[in-house]
Image: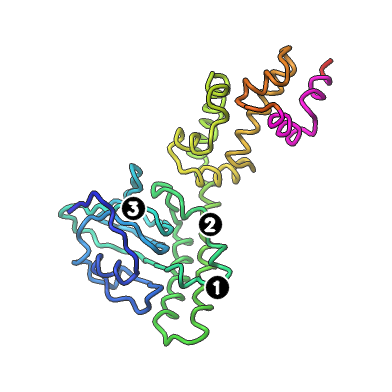
Amino acid sequence: MTTTTPTRVKTIAEFHRLRGLPKPEHPLISVVNLDTVDHSGDNESASLILDFYFIAIKRCLPSKFKYGQQEYDFDEGVMFFIAPGQVFKIEIEPDSTARRSGWLLLIHPDFLWNTPLAKTIKQYQYFDYSVNEALLLSEKEETAAIGILQSIEHEYQSNIDKFSQNIIIAQLELLLVQSDRFYHRQFITRKITNHKIVNRLEEILSDYFNSDDLADKGLPSVQYIADKLNVSPNYLSDLLKVLTGQSTQQHIHEKLIEKAKEKLSTTDLSVSEIAYELGFEHSQSFSKLFKAKTDLSPMKFRQSFN
């Protein structure tokens, strides 16, 4: 049965009940080895909003996962991350006999309360990537990630004492840092696909800056560019930082400065007129950005050509 209205899942125990998993051993964290559980109760599609962090390593799934219109089939071992408040959809394939395999790690924000990770976890932008931007793990990477999950599982299943939370959080931090490393590798090794994105970005920016959209609508937003490229904004910026050293916003500003230099050096338009054509309501804002990027005011730059 497919639901149209997402179901909000407030607790980890509630998620376990909904997906037919064994009762969790802790209210704020859960580690599930999918190889060891009966999946007979986990046979319905669902649209969910979780109030906790969800990390999964999965393979051989008879299901598809979606964010909106984005979809990913888990034919290979992949890792993906979902932050609290996001909507995702599980679609179980009918009459599928494939065995589900992998790991789940669920962490309620309350488990991180009053720890440095409560704040630093937000720096891992892959929690906001679309599912089709999932991490494709190499065999070595998958072994490393599962090893960390097994360490968390061992502590999770032991008698809870005053050291348990710190040990689990230390392992979780290691998992997040390693995942950052794995994504960095993926950005580099998937060169053809990723460089096509960079080339397409340049085309989109050139078309936009050569159209009337700039004066009418102002600078394109990061969201606008990401939508044009069919990727999530955080994924795009992280990818660009690895490949070019600049974020999406910096690429937009670079294209703006390039266009401004062209107008300053080849036209007699005033600085105010150029600022207007580049989408600025106030010429002072344009001049401030131009100087920040070039160490010259627009007038000083123009004078260098005379």
The colour style of the image is rainbow
Q: Is residue 103 left or right of residue 202?
A: left
Classify residue 54 by image quadrant.
Answer: bottom left
Q: Nearer the viewer, residue 49 or 25?
A: 49
Q: Amino acid at mark 2?
A: Tyr
* Precedes in sequence: disc 1 or disc 2: 1
The residue located at (55%, 67%) in the rendering is: 117
Q: Position of residue 184 (x, y in %)?
A: 55, 52
**Circle number at residue 114:** 1
Q: Amino acid at mark 1?
A: Asn
Q: Is label 3 or label 1 in front?
A: 1
Separation of residues labelled 2 and 3 (CA atoms): 19 Å
Q: Nearer the viewer, residue 65 or 260?
A: 260
Q: Kindly state the secondary structure of the residue where label 3 is placed.
A: strand
The residue to which callout 3 is attached is 88
The residue located at (44%, 62%) in the rendering is: 142
In the image, which residues are magenta? 284-304
